[in-house]
Image (tube, grey):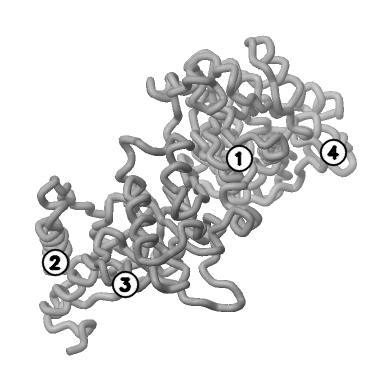
Amino acid sequence: MNPTAPNHPAHGHVTFLGAGPGDPGLLTLRAVEALASADVLIADPQVLEVVRAHARAHVDMPAQPVPDETSKAADIPVLRDTANLVMTAARGGKRVVRAVLGDPGLDGNAADEMLACAAEGITFEVVPGIATAVGVPAYAGVPLRDPKGGDVRFVDARTASETCWSEVGASQATVVVTTTLDSVTAAAGELVAAGRKPDTPLSVTVAGTTTRQRTWTATLGSVAQVLKAAKVLPSPDGGQPVIAVVGERSAADHREPLSWFESKPLFGWNVLVPRTKEQAASLSDQLRSYGAVPHEVPTIAVEPPRTPQQMERAVKGLVTGRYEWIAFTSVNAVKAVREKFEEYGLDARAFAGIKVAAVGEQTAKSLIEFGVKPDLVPSGEQSAAGLLEDWPPYDPVFDPIDRVFLPRADIATETLVAGLIELGWEVDDVTAYRTVRASPPPAETREAIKGGGFDAVLFTSSSTVRNLVGIAGKPHNVTVIACIGPATAKTAEEHGLRVDVLSPEPSVHKLAEALAEFGAARRDAAIEAGDPVTRPSERRPGSRRRARS
């Protein structure tokens, strides 16, 4: 019988999807496509957040069973309950995605659920994922094979028989052991008892492929002492899963040159980004590329102007030909004009015949998304001063209209207005939106800010300094303070903060680069001194306050 040929057309469809070891970037393109069309999402708890980000906003996620101690030992009741969720949704004609940790082909529960679908004639497909036992060693810098080849054996310590241990212990194969932190020593003992030498190299990786990943190198005989010396064991978290790789390629001199992931300049750093989620998106992506864990905390909220008539008159004037130029100084200004356009049933075509200026790359990007290509973006400094450097003076011969529409915040400086007037232009300086201090972040975030739970904070303007301190308190002195320019640094110092990093240019991306360079230099200095590489928040003795990563 072909399991993918439906007996009952009314039945739905099930996609068994491998979500990989934990890094959201390891989802395949096919997995993302399947998630986007799912009616029902049933996921292993370890990967729920990874896959939910790609599902539709209102996808149905039925509550899954939480195993008690008895069902953990037997496995069957929980398996049956999860399979029932899948089958019930499929019988109702739904498109179901069943997401599992790693790869469904190596998941025994998923295999049983596939058989259940086949027995009822429910169509299904399998979207392979990166297996945990393969992905984690790759992120730990432990290649499982070299040009000479060699056998690789995979062992699940929870179900391995005495015969299994005897076979891998007697071989010279590289052994990848799936186990738990508090069972690593027992697994090492099994291999030594079966014939492996106690001095055989061993690597142990927890939280593999995530920014919480940590890897220790030891030998089969010394792993207990190494984990104890690292204060990893004993631990209440001893039940967390780990991947242990046994073989020569786990030796420190082999692994360390290949440890590309844990050696990223900001690996594991909790970095506070005091901007709105929309403003911080590209900056947060850049920080993740350096291995950091960005936490976005809005410090301002944007509200409509108290008197909208001025903005309404300006937009009507834009349509009737009152202006030669419109200048956008922020993403929020673009958003305010766009919303007013939508209110009047207008679109980007209303900008026809009008020159458009943007103060910087992010504002220009926002305009392009609106369907408007800016005519002027500063070639140098991304600021009002930089825009004025490139702005042409008014010429009555070539410019039929002498007026500029400038939609801005209520607290904007007069630099741009004064500069345009000096160049001969008339300016309609219009309040397009108001900026007010945002509400305080959750208590946990405030505690992390004041208690040293963040490794760094990026200040992108003087107002972000004042507002963050106002709504959440002053960052702890172990936190690295990075500022976008001298004015922002001066404001930070006025609030009693030590500025560690100053961006070479007034650009949020250059600021992130500067922080990464600082982190890399700090890491190199620790290695050269023979000290362990730690995050700034780990340097404070007795520190227990941590931002969640």
Badge 3: how crowded within 10 Å, few (<14), some, or many (20+)?
some
Distance from disc 3 to disc 1, alpha carbons, whole Å, reads 34 Å
Q: Which residue is found at the position 43% from the left and 38% from the top?
A: 228
- Residue type of the residue flagged with mark 3: Gly
Sequence-earlier tag: 3 or 4: 3
Asked whether residue 415 is in view, the answer is yes
Q: Which residue is mark 3?
A: 105
Q: Which dot, 3 or 4, sits closer to the camera?
A: 3
Considering the numbered disc 1 on the image, is that residue within a helix, a strand or a loop?
Answer: loop
Q: Nearer the viewer, residue 176 or 486?
A: 176
- Residue type of the residue flagged with mark 4: Asp
Badge 4: how crowded within 10 Å, few (<14), some, or many (20+)?
few
Is 15 situated left or right of 115 in this image? Answer: right
Find residue 404 and report its horizontal and vertical position in percent.
Answer: 73, 33
Q: Which dot, 4 or 1, sits closer to the camera?
A: 1
Q: Which residue is mark 2?
A: 87
Q: Which dot, 1 or 2, sits closer to the camera?
A: 1
Q: Is residue 87 above or below residue 357?
A: below
Sequence-earlier tag: 4 or 1: 1
- Residue type of the residue flagged with mark 2: Met
Q: Which dot, 2 or 3, sits closer to the camera?
A: 3
Considering the numbered disc 2 on the image, is that residue within a helix, a strand or a loop?
Answer: helix
Q: Which residue is mark 4?
A: 390
Considering the numbered disc 3 on the image, is that residue within a helix, a strand or a loop?
Answer: helix
Badge 1: how crowded within 10 Å, few (<14), some, or many (20+)?
many
Q: Which residue is mark 1?
A: 266
Find residue 191 and report its horizontal and vertical position in percent.
Answer: 37, 62
